[in-house]
Amino acid sequence: MRQPTFQDNWLPSWKSSYPYDLLEIYGASDTLGYAYAYNNRRKHTLELIQKVAKPGAKILDVAAAQGNFTLLLAELGYDVTWNDLREDLIDYVKLKWESGLVHYAPGNIFDLNYDGQFDVVLITEVIEHVAHPDDFLKSIAKMLKPNGHIVLSTPNGGYFKNNLPRFSDCSDPSQYEPIQFQPNSDGHIFLLHLDEIERLVHQAGLVIEEIRLVTNPLTNGHIKLHHLLKILPKSWVKNFEEFTCSMPLALKRKLHTTTAALLNHPIQQ
């Protein structure tokens, strides 16, 4: 993935995306917790995709922002469609493109007619920004080919530092429609718990093939542990992450910040 050189005349959306790219892709280390957490999420996302889809498969990357997953998957040989509300980011993504097949489909994903077209739909850190996650997941499911898959990642609602409401406790989600689709953590509306994800998946006619709880407070630099990240070797952080991922589920629900899931759209009999 090509690294662009910052320009003063860039659009505001490009300027706000570039610092995240430095952390996520190009190795900046000024916010190690963010960089470690992103790399961890990318690792698990790619593992789940590669379990079910070979290069050449058609992938839709929803709310793909500056396109880091889009471009990485294209470089791995997938046929990728980038989507985001911010059409002005297309040329920024193209600035970073080096190889692979990428299509661009800007706009509200609810308005796009993509029924039955994709082998995999990628929704990383998206569903928590939507006022109606139940309708969102049903709409995404319709975009899959029979036996297609959704790879989802979202903040874990059961994490001990979470103070946002459960979706299932909200009697009128429509009240959040004016503030949905906002980027970054400030745009989080609900943080879904495992039981809620299981319920939403079932309502959408999907099945869970695999679910992972990942990224502990050290990896993420939470509760002032970011100070330790400055002195600990990467191997120690990695080993501690692997250790906490091997803990019993009850502990992982409280200790890990991120849920990653592989969902299947089974062939109807």
Image (cartoon, helix red, strand yellow):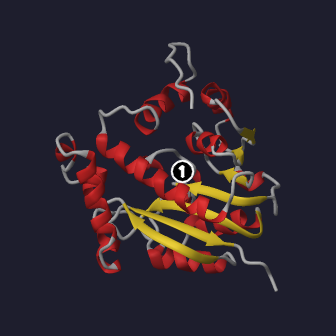
Quadrant assignment for the N terminus:
top right
For this orientation, the residue located farthest to the top is 8
User: Can you tell which quarter of the image residue 106 is in?
Assistant: top right
Where does the image place residue 252, in percent across and percent down from the top left?
Answer: 33, 72
Where does the image place residue 253, in percent across and percent down from the top left?
Answer: 35, 73
* Above or below, 230 relative to 154: above
Q: Residue at x 48, y 58 (%)?
A: 44
Give the left or right position of residue 153, taking residue 33 as reference. right
Give the left or right position of residue 114, taking residue 152 as reference. right
Mark 1 residue type:
Ile
Q: Residue at x 42, y 47 (%)?
A: 39
Q: Nearer the viewer, residue 242 or 70?
A: 242
Q: Residues within 10 Å of mark 1 (few under 14, many from 20)?
A: few
Is residue 188 at all visible to an observer of this figure? no
Quadrant assignment for the C terminus:
bottom right
User: Can you tell which quarter of the image residue 239 is in?
Assistant: bottom left
Is residue 23 at all visible to an observer of this figure? yes
Q: Residue at x 29, y 75 (%)?
A: 247
Q: Which residue is mark 1?
A: 179
Where does the image place residue 165, in percent across and percent down from the top left?
Answer: 41, 67
Give the left or right position of residue 158, taking residue 92 as reference. left
| Mark 1: secondary structure | helix
